[in-house]
Amino acid sequence: MATFTSHTRFLLHLHRTHLHHRTYQFRNAPPIHRTQHTYTHTPRKPTRLKLPPTLSLFVAVSGLIYYAATFHISPQPKTLNPQTFTAYTLASKTPVATSPPSHTTIFSLRPVHPPGQQLPSTEGILSVQIKQPQLQIARSYSPLPSNTGEEDDGALRFLVKLEPGGEVTRYLFSLGVEDKVFLRGPTVEYIFPPAGEVDKTLFIAGGTGIAPALQLAANSLAPETEIFWAVRSRAETGGAMAEEVGRLVRKAGGKVSVRVFVDEEGGIGVHDVERGMEGGKVAVVVSGPEGFIKWVAGEKVWRGGREEQGKLGGMVRKVLEKRGGEVTVFKL
Ligand SMILES: Cc1cc2nc3c(=O)[nH]c(=O)nc-3n(C[C@H](O)[C@H](O)[C@H](O)COP(=O)(O)OP(=O)(O)OC[C@H]3O[C@@H](n4cnc5c(N)ncnc54)[C@H](O)[C@@H]3O)c2cc1C
């Protein structure tokens, strides 16, 4: 068990707990493992459950309302909202790199109805759920920041990595241009600290974790944002993503910098994190696959059906123990 000096204050961001009264808040369901989708059927003698007629009617009506409200019969909404799924059309699929072929692709989704609302991107990091209609499951994805002028049609763009055994990503990658996709959201995953509260944000992103990092870089009020982007291979940072990152850095005019760390070239080390955390009041945000988050800042935990921040660990903890001072840490 590590000890902190009296000068060390570790503040875990409690932003998620503030979110419960927000109208667009919707918590991500834990991933459903494929074994849960396997059904077996053994014929047996039918048994009749005897319920009083009023109770039967109540059960039937409640079931229908639940079914309608969650996935199926809701009237088709025209604008993105957290309760029901809204129809979008797949406008384009742009693989990040074609040579060697990359497993990450930018999906651009255009609303079927003209957009009636803007995403509240200046409030915090947002996610939106994409539905897999055959299995009736949904997963969260972080929209890339919009390119001014290019997306007046309300299109949302997502950087998605294909998981070979993954249910939603396999479905998404199988779609063709003009196919329908259903979205629900947004959820605010992390509220930006108010102006003056932090001097710098260090965002440590693994793989597609760069999408929320770019959202923060485009909208946060922090005077400086440094992004460490860890990738398995340099191909993940080329092509469409190189353009995306370059455009944002140029637009930010010196407020945003991005450093790429390639696993096979050594990856991120404690010394890099230590240097990134130099300065006055620093906020550290970590995003990426579970194992990456654990390695950088300790694992998140599930308690009572909710995902919580868990203890601070990993490289960030080591640096904080050495450095002292005040740092807020949030694991996405
Ligand atoms: C807030 C938030 C934002 C996110 N943003 C993005 C984003 O911008 N881009 C992005 O690409 N991802 C993002 N994700 C991750 C995304 O939500 C999905 O978890 C991811 O795309 C995988 O979904 P899937 O349904 O394809 O895979 P799943 O079906 O959930 O499977 C995940 C992995 O587990 C394995 N698996 C599944 N079932 C089993 C089993 N029974 N036994 C062993 N292994 C199994 C699969 O092979 C796969 O590798 C985000 C997640 C969150 C919470």
Image (cartoon, rainbow, N blue to C red):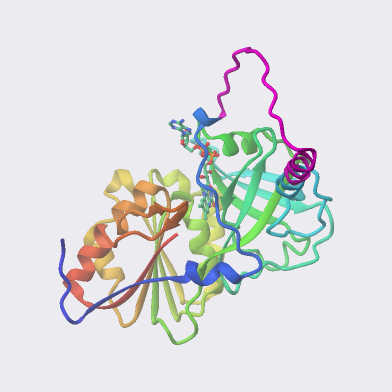
| Residue 149 found in image quarter | bottom right
| Residue 91 makes an appearance in the image | no
Q: In which quarter of the image is the C terminus?
A: bottom left
In magenta segment, residue 123: no
Q: Is residue 324 above or below residue 302?
A: below
Magenta residues?
37-63
Instruction: Judge whether residue 320 can be spotted in this image.
Output: yes
Is residue 26 or residue 219 the one in the foreground?
A: 26
Q: Nearer the viewer, residue 139 or 73?
A: 73
Q: Which residue is drawn at 46% across and 77% down?
A: 255
Residue under the image location 68 percent in, 56 percent down: 156
Farthest residue in the bottom direction?
196
Q: Residue at 49% across / 67% down in the picture?
A: 16
Nearer the observer, 322 or 273 = 322
Q: Position of residue 274 (x, y in %)?
A: 24, 68
Q: In which quarter of the image is the N terminus?
A: bottom left
Locate residue 84, reporting x and y percent.
Answer: 73, 53
Tell me if residue 6 comes above or below residue 211 in the rendering. below
Find residue 137 and report its horizontal and vertical position in percent: 62, 40
Q: Is residue 60 found inside the magenta-colored segment of the image? A: yes
Residue at left 84%, top 60%?
Answer: 114
Can you give x and y, in whole percent of width and height, for residue 160 in the image?
56, 46
Q: What is the quadrant of residue 322 in the picture?
A: bottom left
